Image: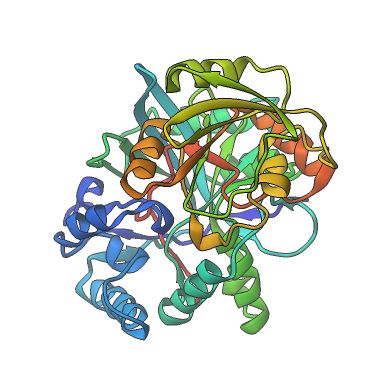
Amino acid sequence: MADVRPFRGIRFDPKKLGLGKALCPPYDVIDPAEAERLRREARNAIHLELPAGAGEERYENAALAWSDWRAQGLLLQDEKPAFYAVEERFAFAGKACRRLGFLAALSVADNGDVVAHERTLSKPKADRLELLKAVWANVSPIFGLFADSAGAARRVFAAAAKAPPAASGRMASGVSYKLWKVDDEADVETLRRALAPAKILIADGHHRFEVSRAFHELHPAAATETVLAYLCPEEDKGLVALSTHRIVSSGMSDYSALCRVDGCKSRAELLTKLEKAKSPYAFGVLERGRYRLAQPKSPDGCASGLCVEWIGKHLLSAVPPDQIKYTPDAGKAVSMAKETGAAVVFVKPFKVEQIRKAVAAVGLLPPKSTYFFPKIATGLVFKSLK
């Protein structure tokens, strides 16, 4: 059974700080320019999520901000355990979107009810572990998906959203947030029952989930046996899944003999042909100013039905992790490549059900195989590990 629990969240006092100034993106998508801008706000969650400083100083700064903000009453802990319904409003592809999910304490027990889909890297795991050791709190949530075919969870969210929010705000990115406490015993039980049979798929936060499990093994207290998680129904109409394109500095293998390769006149033509390509392993390449659509002649040991597997096994297998950068924005990928003379590997679009099938078929996929937009913000609610 998937074990989700209400918890006594620690939140910015809305009378002192609105969510618009409090929130930041998760650590792995904050570029240096955005980090500099966010750090100008002395009370932004970036000081916990991606603290300034060198080496150990970063984690000491995070711990200091955490203790100071709690002592000042900027961060307050709710008296009653609750789930927290979250509404996000944002624009995507020219359309107004709304996503509803909730924050919960999710068990880190290795019982098969939480399904990962990406392999992790040692460097970010070491960083997140040091942050946990310093702050003793889940600063940012992992992002999980669950099936809500009967609609029970969505009905609880919809009912909660009829009341005035406990907190609200708009990020500089344009994403607007509203937050409601769900602490009515009947609603809490409804959500627990709705999630109990679910296999929760980690959409984002694989490193943080693994680190939380490792932290609990190091410190097997009750408070460490769960991790802060944002959980969203797979049926939610605002759920947007994007491909994550690769910007490769060096070491990419020759693919011409393994693929049927067709030239394209522009990025737009390539992306259109890539989406329509019959081969699930098709991918696009920008190399030396030329756009190409590549369709592998054979799966070559791949069974996932997702091109990231073929790319990882055959195209990028010899490329060191630090030679690859990632973005879901195809235009930004091209700009990044032009700045450094790198190549771009464009990933074919996919659907959520394809990810579950891929995991069932082959297990873990390469890192950064998916990108769920928007990333759930850091600073909505924190969860203490003490």
| Drawn side of residue 196 relative to residue 151, left or right | right
The type of colouring in the image is: rainbow
- Residue 242: image location, x then y, percent: 52, 32
Q: Is residue 193 visible?
A: no
The answer, for residue 384, to whether it is visible in the render is: yes
Tell me: residue 134, above or below residue 206. below
Above or below, 305 against 365 in this view is: above
* Residue in the foreground of this view, choosing between 212 and 12: 212
Q: Residue at x 76, y 63 (%)?
A: 110
The picture places residue 236, in percent across and down from the top left corner, at: 55, 26
**How many tags in the picture?**
0
Rendering coords of residue 83 (x, y %): 50, 49
Q: Nearer the viewer, residue 297 or 95?
A: 297
Residue 324 drawn above or below residue 200: below
Q: Residue at x 70, y 36 (%)?
A: 355
Q: Residue at x 66, y 42 (%)?
A: 311
Q: Where in the figure is residue 13, as x and y percent of width and height?
A: 24, 58
When the figure is inspected, residue 12 is found, relative to residue 245, above or below; the finding is below
Q: Determine whether, in the image, residue 117 is placed left or right of residue 7.
A: right
Q: Residue at x 75, y 35 (%)?
A: 258
